[in-house]
Image (tube, helix red, strand yellow):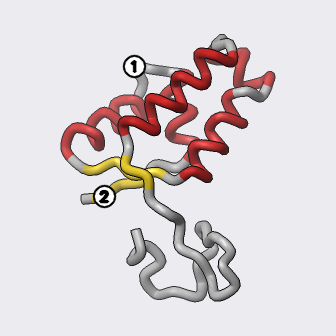
Amino acid sequence: MRVMCDTNILVRTVISPHGPAAELVRMIARDHLLVTSLYVLSELFDVLRRPKIRKLHKLHDAKIRRVVSRFYTLATLVPLPRDEKGSELFFGLENSSDPFSSL
């Protein structure tokens, strides 16, 4: 099964490497196919650099880049579904009965 974790789960994994979110990501990577997108990885990088979040994980920029790179390596990159204008669709996918059919 292909599973995509949102940025919140990935951030929680970084903040608490032995917590429930980290265990979930490890289980997905072990038993399923973890998928992500460039959008999620970019958002992860941005969120991890926010001062409030940085206080929680205490990582410098080089380490943050390595963390994002690790998720890039661990997961399979997939494009996000697009609407008829070519814009990426997120969770407000009212135009499709099966929004993840293109994953």
* Residue 72 image position (x, y, % from top left): 46, 38
Q: Secondary structure at mark 2?
A: strand
Residue type (three-letter) at the residue carrying disc 2: Arg
Residue at 42% over, 24% down: 19
Nearer-the-camera pick, 18 or 83 = 83
Kindly indicate the quadrant of the structure image that contains residue 90. Answer: bottom right
Residue furthest to the right: 51
Question: Which of the numbered marks, if any, corresponds to residue 39?
Answer: none
* Residue 37 image position (x, y, % from top left): 52, 53
Residue at 70% over, 35% down: 47
Q: Quadrant of the C terminus?
A: bottom left
13 on left or right of 35: right
Kindly indicate the quadrant of the structure image that contains residue 24. Answer: top left
96 on left or right of 58: left
At label 1, counting other C-alpha atoms closer than 10 Å, the crowd grade (few under 14, some 14-19, many 20 or more) is: few
Residue at 57% over, 50% down: 38
Residue type (three-letter) at the residue carrying disc 1: His
Q: Quadrant of the N terminus?
A: bottom left
Nearer-the-camera pick, 101 or 15 = 101
Residue behind mark 2: 2
Q: Secondary structure at mark 1?
A: loop
Residue behind mark 1: 18
Residue at 58% over, 49% down: 40
